[in-house]
Amino acid sequence: MFNYILKKEFLLIIRDIHALLVLFIMPAVFILIMSLALKNTYSDSFETKLKVAVITEENIDTTTFVKDLNKSSYFSADLLFEESLKTLIYDKNYDFVIKIDKDFKNKINTNEEDFQIQSYSKADTNKEYFSILKNSIVEIISKNIMKEYFIKSKIDGKVLSQLSQKINNSYIYKDDKTKTKPNSVQQSVPAWLVFSMFFILIPISNTFINEKNFGTISRIRSINVSLFPILLGKILPYFIINQIQVIIMILIGIYIVPLCGGDSLVINGNYLLIFCMSSAISICAICFALLIANISKTTEEATSIGGVINIIFAALGGIMVPKFVMPEFMQNITSYSPMSWGLEGLLEIFIRGGDFSNIKIYLLYLLIFATISLLLAYILLKKGRN
Amino acid sequence: MSIIIKDLNKSYNNQHILENLSLQINTGSVFGLLGPNGAGKTTLVSILNQLIKKDSGNIEIYGFDLEKNSNEIKKISSYIPQTYAFYPNLTSYENLEFFGALYGLSGEKLKQQINYCIEVTSLEKYIHKKAFAYSGGVKRRLNIAIGLLNSPKIIYFDEPTVGIDPQSRKYILDVIKNLNKKLDTTIIYTSHYMEEIEFLCDEIAILDKKRIIIQDKKENLIQKKSIISIQLENRTLEVDVLNSYDNFLNIMSELKNKNEKIININFVDKNLENMFLSLTKEELRD
């Protein structure tokens, strides 16, 4: 009997084209887009450098300045003579235009107070980009002046010229565990995988609500059949679908994202632990889906309620915006989203090479959430029957 | 007796739906359960199919107590709901296979039973087409086919012909009649269509205001009301002459004394609908 129950449920899932799109195509597209789109955010350099036009007259100082600016991994600079700012910014697509006096070095050395370097950009330019540009200009000019000073004073300024390479940053987290900042694909794959696993609620609620509304559940209950194989037959196919999602999304991260120009997914951890985490996420998502299916009267209602809650879970849980870029109070809020527990557990394994002791707390949270959801679903189902 | 119900009570939110309801249904009969909307028909059928629990009372089905022998009763019963209780994204064959498996059938026995149900309901053309694309009539036939998978001794049909064309309706009624005649299956049939009940049923009960208000053989029941309609100049009087012929004579003599002009006198058709309306009254129900 059980094989027929499984067959029925698999046929229903396979024939639900909308659910398949949400479960497989949506996360695959998100992983590709977000891995490529967020590449700069996670990288120490820009894939597409910011275009800078330096308007000045050509001399040894200005040419060196532009040359040094081009050495930066963030900028691609051109030395230009007077030209319209609007043409440069809007027609020639320069991100920044810098006006600098050809005698800037002398003016700095002589402490000329009205000396200025003026930058221009579009109104919606990222302020962080301007900060990077400003710091780079300060660094380039200071280095040049100091270099001349050291030569005159016969001081070896080797360390000074390598100063930027000698400045490194380490992330400090409140739980004092060593954590590595993920690259874009290592953040995107687990994030959108967890997100899509929770969307199992669409096929579950569709089937469950249709069964409820069409009287199929009543018919099944009027048959002399135990509830256990029926329930297991409903849960197991969705669990298997979730595990297929895990395999496909990991393969996309490893093989497809690099083909499109992104980084490749590197998994440092144990595959058995990935299965433990994905199982807990799946059980949590299925139980939550059963709760939503019991709360809702129609499939439209389930899709709206479940969809909105999933998106809130995702926004709070570091799926849409990575947790490490959030301010501290938002990072604290993420602890209340089941998607965050799933994501953090997977990141522990994917990036930090964590062992079971590192993920057990997330497993526990997910299973507690699953148990509460299932209990509430059962109470609602029983209430409905009475 | 296939079903014996004694003093059945059921209430929701402190409101009585069924009150001290008693009923007996003969084995092998086609039993019509009539009643206006909200009379409690669905509640009664749901209790008999163990979809909801009764508050009190005794129910025996084929000698089995509903509470003590619920599994035995489920094995010999089949419930064919008003809704299309199957999976629209599956074909007829896949639906029958799934429900057959739930009835404990497998292998060759399952195939044989599926083929039998397909043949009885003439679903041959549709077995590999998905059910959502069927017409209302074919959907109803699939609904019935699923209910025949366990070769039940008793089948509950809950308004099985709602929303279908006359040809499909006739076909379904013939299938039900044949099931009763050939296999001696007890049929419990609820419907709002009086002509269907008249065509199908040997015995009829009318459920209204929480209890069975009348139960008898169809012929007896229709005979129990003989109405004469007296059309006067400004109104029409209806008189039950079967229960009180004296009353009819008195009325006629009174009309004569008052010099009221009688325009026409008719015997109202002795059909089930008139009997039903006269018993349950004509006011609208929720």
Image (tube, grey):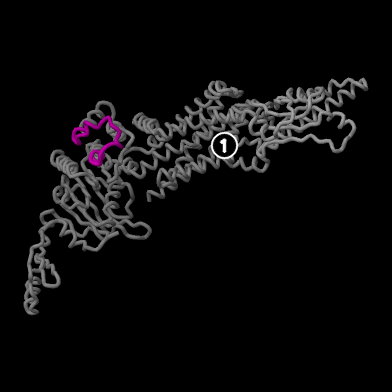
Task: Provide residue A377's location: percent of width, then percent of height.
Answer: 45, 44
Q: Nearer the viewer, residue B242 or B236?
A: B236
The quadrant in which the C terminus of chain B is found is bottom left
User: Callout 1: few (<14), some (14-19), or many (20+) C-alpha neighbours within 10 Å?
Assistant: few
Left of A51 or right of it: where is A64?
right
Corner quadrant of residue A378: top left
User: Which chain is home to disc 1?
Assistant: A
Q: Nearer the viewer, residue A82 or B258?
A: A82
Residue type, mark 1 in image = Leu
Q: Is residue A270 above or below residue B237?
A: above
Return the residue found at the far right.
A153
Q: Nearer the viewer, residue A190 or B70?
A: A190
Task: Provide residue B73's location: percent of width, then percent of height.
Answer: 27, 43
Q: Is residue A243 above or below residue B250?
A: above
Corner quadrant of residue A354: top right
Residue at x 73%, y 23% (from the top left corner): A70
Task: Provide residue A308's location: percent of width, then percent of height.
Answer: 51, 43
Secondary structure that dominates the magenta span: helix
Residue B119 visible somewhere in the drawing = yes
Location of mark 1 (residue): A364
Residue at x 37%, y 41% (from the top left corner): A210
Q: Which residues are magenta?
A: B117-140
Task: Provide residue B94's location: percent of width, then percent of height.
Answer: 30, 31
Residue A166 visible somewhere in the drawing = no
Q: Secondary structure at mark 1?
A: helix
